[in-house]
Amino acid sequence: MAKSFSPKAMAVVAYDKRTGAIVHVHHVITMTGARQTPEKDLRKTALQDTADRCGRRVSEIDTIVVESKQLEGPKTFRVDPAKRKVVASKGQGQSGGSFGTTFPPPK
């Protein structure tokens, strides 16, 4: 009998603390039997990577960890900074979801 694999797909969502605009999403897939990276390490890595890529201060960005499936669908997403939750914005995004960006792309 073939062994069943059940990977765990998570997303570290980096967002502007003030506006809630999502500026980067770091997807992490942990295969069955593999050691899961601690959430604090995922958040720290994503936070610094986002700040470096966007040329922004770490103090302007925060991160949350969600299941990747929360970011599926033809919606535009943002983070409610007060609740620290991903929410779908009004209107529709592109297929597969889209994210508002307030930071310039990497140089």
Image: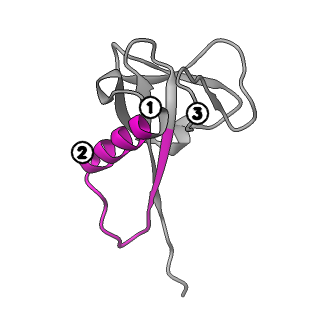
In the image, what residue occupies the spot 31% across and 61% down? 36
Q: Residues within 10 Å of mark 1 (few under 14, many from 20)?
A: some
Q: Nearer the viewer, mark 3 or mark 2?
A: 3
Where is 65 relative to 33, above or below? above
In the image, what residue occupies the spot 66% across and 33% down? 97
Where is 38 relative to 57, above or below? below
| Label 2 SS | helix
| Label located before the other in sequence (3 or 1) | 1
Name the side, left or right, on which 36 lies relative to 88. Answer: left
Q: Position of residue 3 (x, y in %)?
A: 50, 81
Residue occupied by mark 3 = 105
As measured in the structure, the alpha-carbon distance from the residue carrying label 2 to the one carrying label 1 is: 22 Å
The chosen color scheme is: one colour
Residue occupied by mark 2 = 40
Depth check, front residue: 105 or 96: 105
| Label 1 SS | loop
What's under tag 3, amino acid-wise? Pro
> Decide: marks 3, 1 in contact (CB < 8 A)?
no
Q: Residues within 10 Å of mark 3 (few under 14, many from 20)?
A: few
Numbered circle sitting on residue 55: 1
Query: Which residue range is magenta in the image?
Result: 25-52
